[in-house]
Image: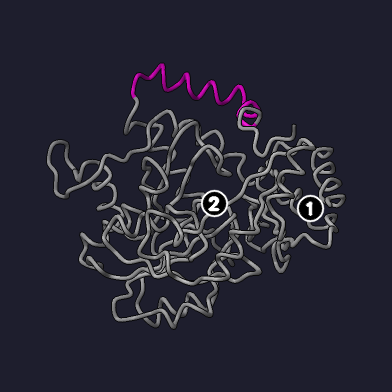
Amino acid sequence: MIKFLDLKAINDSFEPELSNAIKRVLDAGWYLQGSETRLFESEYSQFIGTKHCIGVANGLDALRLILKAYIEMGIMSEGDEIIVPANTFIASILAISDNRLKPIFVEPDLNTYNIDPLKIEKQITVRTKGIMLVHLYGHNAMSPEIQHLTEEYNLKLIEDNAQAIGACYGNKRTGDLGHVSGHSFYPGKNLGCLGDGGAVTTNDDELAAIIRALANYGSKVKYVSEYQGLNSRLDEMQAAVLRVKLKRLDSDNFRRHQIAQYYCDNINNKDIILPVKSNYFQLSNFNNQLPHVWHLFVIRHKLRDQLQSYLSENGVQTLIHYPIPPHKQIAYRSFNSLKLPITEQIHNEVLSLPISPIMYDDEVVKVVELINNAF
Protein backbone atom coordinates (compact mmCIF):
# COMPACT_ATOMS: atom_id res chain seq x y z
CA MET A 1 0.00 0.00 0.00
CA ILE A 2 1.26 3.45 -0.91
CA LYS A 3 0.12 5.50 2.06
CA PHE A 4 -1.27 8.97 1.53
CA LEU A 5 1.13 10.25 4.18
CA ASP A 6 3.37 7.91 6.20
CA LEU A 7 3.89 9.94 9.36
CA LYS A 8 5.96 7.24 11.07
CA ALA A 9 8.36 7.07 8.14
CA ILE A 10 8.61 10.86 8.05
CA ASN A 11 9.45 11.03 11.75
CA ASP A 12 11.89 8.13 11.45
CA SER A 13 13.77 10.14 8.82
CA PHE A 14 14.62 12.74 11.48
CA GLU A 15 16.27 10.29 13.85
CA PRO A 16 18.26 10.41 16.04
CA GLU A 17 17.79 14.20 16.23
CA LEU A 18 14.09 13.87 17.07
CA SER A 19 14.63 11.50 19.98
CA ASN A 20 17.51 13.63 21.22
CA ALA A 21 15.27 16.71 21.23
CA ILE A 22 12.55 14.89 23.15
CA LYS A 23 15.10 13.63 25.70
CA ARG A 24 16.42 17.17 26.08
CA VAL A 25 12.96 18.30 27.18
CA LEU A 26 12.54 15.35 29.53
CA ASP A 27 15.93 15.98 31.09
CA ALA A 28 15.16 19.67 31.54
CA GLY A 29 11.96 18.92 33.43
CA TRP A 30 10.30 22.09 32.05
CA TYR A 31 7.28 21.59 29.81
CA LEU A 32 5.62 24.96 29.11
CA GLN A 33 6.91 28.44 28.28
CA GLY A 34 10.53 27.44 28.49
CA SER A 35 13.68 27.76 26.41
CA GLU A 36 12.59 25.37 23.62
CA THR A 37 9.53 27.47 22.89
CA ARG A 38 11.47 30.73 23.03
CA LEU A 39 14.13 29.37 20.68
CA PHE A 40 11.57 27.98 18.25
CA GLU A 41 9.67 31.27 18.20
CA SER A 42 12.91 33.08 17.40
CA GLU A 43 13.94 30.59 14.70
CA TYR A 44 10.49 30.47 13.13
CA SER A 45 10.05 34.24 13.04
CA GLN A 46 13.44 34.46 11.34
CA PHE A 47 12.38 31.77 8.84
CA ILE A 48 9.12 33.54 8.00
CA GLY A 49 10.68 37.01 8.11
CA THR A 50 8.61 38.66 10.84
CA LYS A 51 9.51 40.45 14.07
CA HIS A 52 7.25 38.30 16.22
CA CYS A 53 6.20 34.67 16.54
CA ILE A 54 3.83 33.51 19.29
CA GLY A 55 3.52 29.76 19.75
CA VAL A 56 -0.05 28.63 20.41
CA ALA A 57 -1.90 25.34 20.84
CA ASN A 58 -3.10 24.84 17.26
CA GLY A 59 -3.86 26.55 13.97
CA LEU A 60 -7.49 27.27 14.74
CA ASP A 61 -6.50 29.02 17.98
CA ALA A 62 -3.97 31.08 16.06
CA LEU A 63 -6.77 32.52 13.90
CA ARG A 64 -9.18 32.84 16.84
CA LEU A 65 -6.61 34.77 18.86
CA ILE A 66 -5.81 37.13 15.98
CA LEU A 67 -9.44 38.18 15.63
CA LYS A 68 -9.93 38.30 19.39
CA ALA A 69 -6.94 40.63 19.68
CA TYR A 70 -8.29 42.95 17.00
CA ILE A 71 -11.55 43.14 18.95
CA GLU A 72 -9.64 43.99 22.13
CA MET A 73 -7.85 46.73 20.20
CA GLY A 74 -11.15 48.19 19.04
CA ILE A 75 -10.35 47.55 15.39
CA MET A 76 -13.18 45.05 15.04
CA SER A 77 -16.45 44.51 16.88
CA GLU A 78 -19.28 42.00 16.98
CA GLY A 79 -21.12 41.79 13.66
CA ASP A 80 -18.24 43.07 11.55
CA GLU A 81 -17.52 41.18 8.36
CA ILE A 82 -14.46 39.19 7.35
CA ILE A 83 -14.09 38.16 3.72
CA VAL A 84 -13.02 34.53 3.46
CA PRO A 85 -12.67 31.99 0.64
CA ALA A 86 -15.73 29.79 0.22
CA ASN A 87 -13.35 26.95 -0.65
CA THR A 88 -11.41 26.30 2.54
CA PHE A 89 -11.16 24.06 5.57
CA ILE A 90 -13.82 24.72 8.22
CA ALA A 91 -11.28 26.17 10.70
CA SER A 92 -11.07 29.42 8.72
CA ILE A 93 -14.79 29.94 9.23
CA LEU A 94 -14.87 28.73 12.84
CA ALA A 95 -12.32 31.36 13.87
CA ILE A 96 -14.54 34.11 12.46
CA SER A 97 -17.86 32.96 13.89
CA ASP A 98 -16.28 32.11 17.26
CA ASN A 99 -15.53 35.84 17.64
CA ARG A 100 -19.10 36.76 16.66
CA LEU A 101 -17.88 38.17 13.38
CA LYS A 102 -19.59 37.40 10.09
CA PRO A 103 -17.87 35.37 7.35
CA ILE A 104 -18.49 36.67 3.83
CA PHE A 105 -17.85 33.89 1.34
CA VAL A 106 -16.08 34.60 -1.93
CA GLU A 107 -15.82 32.00 -4.66
CA PRO A 108 -12.41 30.63 -5.72
CA ASP A 109 -10.68 30.73 -9.05
CA LEU A 110 -11.36 27.29 -10.55
CA ASN A 111 -7.79 27.14 -11.85
CA THR A 112 -5.99 27.80 -8.56
CA TYR A 113 -8.69 26.83 -5.99
CA ASN A 114 -7.70 29.94 -4.02
CA ILE A 115 -9.95 32.97 -3.54
CA ASP A 116 -10.65 34.81 -6.81
CA PRO A 117 -9.16 38.32 -6.34
CA LEU A 118 -11.52 39.75 -8.94
CA LYS A 119 -14.61 38.74 -6.95
CA ILE A 120 -13.65 40.33 -3.63
CA GLU A 121 -14.41 44.01 -4.11
CA LYS A 122 -18.13 43.61 -4.76
CA GLN A 123 -18.45 41.89 -1.35
CA ILE A 124 -16.89 44.78 0.58
CA THR A 125 -19.31 46.82 2.70
CA VAL A 126 -19.00 49.41 5.46
CA ARG A 127 -18.86 46.51 7.96
CA THR A 128 -15.94 44.77 6.24
CA LYS A 129 -12.88 44.88 8.47
CA GLY A 130 -10.59 42.25 7.03
CA ILE A 131 -9.75 39.62 4.44
CA MET A 132 -8.74 36.16 5.61
CA LEU A 133 -6.43 34.94 2.88
CA VAL A 134 -6.10 31.15 2.84
CA HIS A 135 -3.07 29.76 1.02
CA LEU A 136 -4.92 26.55 0.17
CA TYR A 137 -3.17 23.24 -0.58
CA GLY A 138 0.22 24.99 -0.20
CA HIS A 139 -0.15 27.61 -2.93
CA ASN A 140 0.38 31.30 -2.27
CA ALA A 141 -2.95 33.14 -2.69
CA MET A 142 -1.61 36.69 -2.53
CA SER A 143 -1.93 38.98 -5.57
CA PRO A 144 -1.49 42.66 -6.48
CA GLU A 145 -5.29 43.00 -6.60
CA ILE A 146 -5.67 41.85 -2.99
CA GLN A 147 -2.87 44.12 -1.84
CA HIS A 148 -4.61 47.05 -3.56
CA LEU A 149 -7.97 46.27 -1.92
CA THR A 150 -6.51 46.08 1.59
CA GLU A 151 -4.90 49.48 1.12
CA GLU A 152 -7.84 51.18 -0.61
CA TYR A 153 -10.43 50.01 1.94
CA ASN A 154 -8.14 49.97 4.99
CA LEU A 155 -8.69 46.27 5.63
CA LYS A 156 -6.66 43.94 7.82
CA LEU A 157 -5.06 41.16 5.78
CA ILE A 158 -5.03 37.99 7.88
CA GLU A 159 -3.20 35.05 6.37
CA ASP A 160 -4.30 31.51 7.08
CA ASN A 161 -0.92 29.95 6.41
CA ALA A 162 -1.75 26.53 7.83
CA GLN A 163 -1.05 24.73 4.55
CA ALA A 164 1.68 26.82 2.89
CA ILE A 165 4.57 27.10 5.33
CA GLY A 166 7.66 27.86 3.28
CA ALA A 167 5.90 29.21 0.19
CA CYS A 168 6.82 32.63 -1.16
CA TYR A 169 5.36 35.62 -2.96
CA GLY A 170 7.85 38.02 -4.45
CA ASN A 171 10.68 38.44 -1.96
CA LYS A 172 8.67 37.35 1.08
CA ARG A 173 7.35 34.14 2.55
CA THR A 174 3.69 33.53 3.15
CA GLY A 175 3.07 34.41 6.77
CA ASP A 176 4.76 37.78 6.23
CA LEU A 177 2.53 39.17 3.46
CA GLY A 178 -0.28 40.73 5.47
CA HIS A 179 -0.75 42.29 8.88
CA VAL A 180 -0.74 38.97 10.74
CA SER A 181 -0.77 35.25 10.02
CA GLY A 182 -1.95 32.02 11.65
CA HIS A 183 0.05 28.79 11.21
CA SER A 184 -0.69 25.15 11.96
CA PHE A 185 1.81 22.46 12.94
CA TYR A 186 -0.68 19.58 12.85
CA PRO A 187 1.31 16.35 12.26
CA GLY A 188 0.28 16.09 8.60
CA LYS A 189 1.42 19.60 7.69
CA ASN A 190 4.67 20.26 5.80
CA LEU A 191 6.09 21.37 9.16
CA GLY A 192 4.33 19.06 11.60
CA CYS A 193 4.86 18.31 15.27
CA LEU A 194 3.81 15.20 17.24
CA GLY A 195 0.40 16.54 18.23
CA ASP A 196 -1.39 19.84 17.90
CA GLY A 197 0.56 23.06 17.61
CA GLY A 198 0.32 26.46 15.99
CA ALA A 199 1.74 29.96 15.85
CA VAL A 200 0.97 33.57 15.02
CA THR A 201 3.46 35.73 13.14
CA THR A 202 3.29 39.51 12.78
CA ASN A 203 5.36 42.69 12.64
CA ASP A 204 2.85 44.58 14.82
CA ASP A 205 4.30 45.01 18.32
CA GLU A 206 1.01 45.84 20.03
CA LEU A 207 -0.90 43.05 18.32
CA ALA A 208 1.80 40.51 19.23
CA ALA A 209 1.78 41.53 22.90
CA ILE A 210 -2.01 41.23 23.14
CA ILE A 211 -2.09 37.85 21.36
CA ARG A 212 0.60 36.49 23.68
CA ALA A 213 -1.39 37.63 26.71
CA LEU A 214 -4.70 36.33 25.35
CA ALA A 215 -3.15 32.92 24.76
CA ASN A 216 -1.97 32.82 28.38
CA TYR A 217 -5.28 33.28 30.22
CA GLY A 218 -5.30 36.95 29.23
CA SER A 219 -2.26 37.50 31.41
CA LYS A 220 1.06 39.27 30.90
CA VAL A 221 1.99 38.81 34.56
CA LYS A 222 1.15 35.53 36.31
CA TYR A 223 -2.24 35.60 38.08
CA VAL A 224 -3.01 39.08 36.72
CA SER A 225 -5.51 38.84 33.85
CA GLU A 226 -5.93 41.94 31.69
CA TYR A 227 -8.16 40.18 29.16
CA GLN A 228 -10.69 37.36 29.10
CA GLY A 229 -8.20 35.05 27.46
CA LEU A 230 -7.66 31.42 26.56
CA ASN A 231 -5.24 28.68 27.49
CA SER A 232 -3.50 28.17 24.15
CA ARG A 233 0.23 27.60 24.36
CA LEU A 234 2.75 25.63 22.33
CA ASP A 235 4.39 23.18 24.72
CA GLU A 236 8.12 22.53 25.06
CA MET A 237 8.00 19.04 23.55
CA GLN A 238 6.32 20.22 20.36
CA ALA A 239 8.63 23.23 20.12
CA ALA A 240 11.69 20.98 20.39
CA VAL A 241 10.35 18.69 17.65
CA LEU A 242 9.58 21.64 15.40
CA ARG A 243 13.09 23.04 15.84
CA VAL A 244 14.50 19.80 14.43
CA LYS A 245 12.09 19.69 11.49
CA LEU A 246 12.35 23.37 10.59
CA LYS A 247 15.99 22.94 9.56
CA ARG A 248 14.98 20.58 6.75
CA LEU A 249 11.74 22.25 5.68
CA ASP A 250 12.98 23.93 2.51
CA SER A 251 14.59 20.75 1.19
CA ASP A 252 11.52 18.69 2.12
CA ASN A 253 9.31 21.17 0.28
CA PHE A 254 11.59 20.91 -2.74
CA ARG A 255 11.11 17.14 -2.77
CA ARG A 256 7.35 17.72 -2.82
CA HIS A 257 7.95 20.13 -5.71
CA GLN A 258 9.78 17.39 -7.64
CA ILE A 259 6.97 14.89 -7.13
CA ALA A 260 4.34 17.43 -8.18
CA GLN A 261 6.38 18.22 -11.30
CA TYR A 262 6.49 14.52 -12.20
CA TYR A 263 2.75 14.15 -11.66
CA CYS A 264 1.99 17.15 -13.86
CA ASP A 265 4.40 16.10 -16.60
CA ASN A 266 3.34 12.46 -16.77
CA ILE A 267 -0.35 12.12 -15.88
CA ASN A 268 -2.06 12.10 -19.27
CA ASN A 269 -5.50 10.68 -18.55
CA LYS A 270 -7.81 13.03 -20.47
CA ASP A 271 -10.48 12.86 -17.76
CA ILE A 272 -8.12 14.07 -15.03
CA ILE A 273 -7.90 17.80 -14.36
CA LEU A 274 -4.43 18.62 -13.06
CA PRO A 275 -3.38 21.73 -11.15
CA VAL A 276 -2.93 24.57 -13.63
CA LYS A 277 0.84 24.96 -13.81
CA SER A 278 1.08 28.74 -14.36
CA ASN A 279 3.98 29.73 -12.08
CA TYR A 280 3.83 26.71 -9.78
CA PHE A 281 7.23 25.37 -10.82
CA GLN A 282 9.09 28.62 -11.34
CA LEU A 283 11.61 29.14 -8.57
CA SER A 284 11.69 32.73 -7.34
CA ASN A 285 14.73 34.97 -7.14
CA PHE A 286 14.17 34.95 -3.38
CA ASN A 287 16.58 32.19 -2.34
CA ASN A 288 15.10 29.96 -5.07
CA GLN A 289 11.90 29.65 -3.04
CA LEU A 290 8.66 28.08 -4.24
CA PRO A 291 5.31 29.79 -4.80
CA HIS A 292 3.67 26.41 -4.14
CA VAL A 293 4.95 23.99 -1.49
CA TRP A 294 2.49 21.22 -2.39
CA HIS A 295 1.02 20.44 0.99
CA LEU A 296 -1.56 18.64 -1.12
CA PHE A 297 -1.50 17.55 -4.75
CA VAL A 298 -5.12 17.88 -5.82
CA ILE A 299 -6.61 16.57 -9.04
CA ARG A 300 -10.24 16.67 -10.20
CA HIS A 301 -12.37 14.01 -11.84
CA LYS A 302 -16.12 13.94 -12.45
CA LEU A 303 -16.19 10.34 -11.16
CA ARG A 304 -14.03 11.14 -8.16
CA ASP A 305 -15.45 8.50 -5.82
CA GLN A 306 -15.01 5.73 -8.39
CA LEU A 307 -11.46 6.87 -9.06
CA GLN A 308 -10.68 6.81 -5.35
CA SER A 309 -12.07 3.27 -5.04
CA TYR A 310 -10.05 2.12 -8.06
CA LEU A 311 -6.81 3.52 -6.62
CA SER A 312 -7.52 2.00 -3.21
CA GLU A 313 -8.15 -1.41 -4.76
CA ASN A 314 -4.77 -1.10 -6.46
CA GLY A 315 -2.87 -0.15 -3.32
CA VAL A 316 -2.86 3.66 -3.41
CA GLN A 317 -4.36 5.61 -0.53
CA THR A 318 -5.93 8.97 -1.36
CA LEU A 319 -7.98 11.52 0.59
CA ILE A 320 -10.64 14.11 -0.21
CA HIS A 321 -9.90 17.69 0.86
CA TYR A 322 -12.74 18.43 1.46
CA PRO A 323 -15.99 16.54 0.82
CA ILE A 324 -18.37 19.18 2.22
CA PRO A 325 -17.85 22.94 1.74
CA PRO A 326 -18.20 25.13 4.84
CA HIS A 327 -21.46 26.75 3.72
CA LYS A 328 -23.08 23.30 3.43
CA GLN A 329 -22.05 22.07 6.89
CA ILE A 330 -24.75 21.33 9.47
CA ALA A 331 -22.98 23.66 11.89
CA TYR A 332 -23.68 26.58 9.52
CA ARG A 333 -27.31 25.96 8.64
CA SER A 334 -27.89 29.67 8.09
CA PHE A 335 -25.54 29.51 5.09
CA ASN A 336 -26.86 26.25 3.64
CA SER A 337 -29.02 28.05 1.08
CA LEU A 338 -26.10 29.99 -0.41
CA LYS A 339 -25.39 29.20 -4.04
CA LEU A 340 -21.65 28.89 -4.57
CA PRO A 341 -21.40 26.68 -7.66
CA ILE A 342 -17.63 26.81 -8.19
CA THR A 343 -16.94 25.86 -4.59
CA GLU A 344 -19.50 23.05 -4.75
CA GLN A 345 -18.03 21.72 -7.99
CA ILE A 346 -14.56 21.65 -6.45
CA HIS A 347 -15.73 19.76 -3.37
CA ASN A 348 -17.53 17.22 -5.56
CA GLU A 349 -14.56 16.53 -7.81
CA VAL A 350 -11.27 16.92 -5.88
CA LEU A 351 -9.01 14.05 -4.90
CA SER A 352 -5.64 14.39 -3.17
CA LEU A 353 -2.86 12.07 -4.32
CA PRO A 354 -0.01 10.84 -2.11
CA ILE A 355 2.82 13.36 -1.82
CA SER A 356 5.49 13.62 0.85
CA PRO A 357 9.23 14.16 1.16
CA ILE A 358 9.85 10.47 1.85
CA MET A 359 7.96 9.02 -1.15
CA TYR A 360 10.09 6.75 -3.32
CA ASP A 361 10.37 7.37 -7.05
CA ASP A 362 8.87 3.99 -7.89
CA GLU A 363 5.82 4.84 -5.77
CA VAL A 364 5.33 8.07 -7.67
CA VAL A 365 5.64 6.19 -10.98
CA LYS A 366 3.10 3.61 -9.86
CA VAL A 367 0.55 6.31 -8.94
CA VAL A 368 0.94 7.88 -12.38
CA GLU A 369 0.63 4.55 -14.20
CA LEU A 370 -2.54 3.62 -12.32
CA ILE A 371 -4.16 7.00 -13.00
CA ASN A 372 -3.27 6.88 -16.69
CA ASN A 373 -4.87 3.43 -16.92
CA ALA A 374 -7.98 4.36 -14.90
CA PHE A 375 -11.32 3.43 -16.51
Q: Secondary structure at mark 1?
A: helix
Reading the image, the residue beneath label 2 is 163
Please give the range of residues in magenta.
Answer: 10-30
**Which image quadrant for residue 6?**
top right
In the displayed structure, would residue 268 be above or below residue 1?
below
Q: Quadrant of the N terminus?
A: top right
Q: Earlier in the sequence, mark 1 or mark 2?
A: 2
Under mark 2, the amino acid is Gln
Tell me what residue is drawn at x 67 percent, y 63 percent.
284
**Horizontally, is 197 left or right of 187 in the view?**
left
**Horizontally, is 205 left or right of 283 in the view?**
left
Q: Residues within 10 Å of mark 1 (few under 14, many from 20)?
A: many
The x and y percentages for residue 363 are 80, 38
In the displayed structure, would residue 169 be above or below residue 231?
below
Q: Evaluate if marks 1 and 2 touch, with contact meaning CB atoms under 8 Å apart.
A: no
**Horizontally, is 357 left or right of 29 in the view?**
right
Q: How many marks?
A: 2
Residue 17 lies in the magenta stretch: yes
Coloration mode: one colour
**Horizontally, is 302 left or right of 208 in the view?**
right
Tell me what residue is drawn at x 63 percent, y 66 percent.
112
Reading the image, the residue beneath label 1 is 263
The x and y percentages for residue 333 are 37, 60
The x and y percentages for residue 316 are 74, 39
Which mark is drawn over residue 216?
A: none
In the displayed structure, would residue 327 be above or below residue 235?
below
The answer to which of 152 and 332 lies nearer the viewer is 332
Under mark 1, the amino acid is Tyr
Magenta highlight: main SS: helix
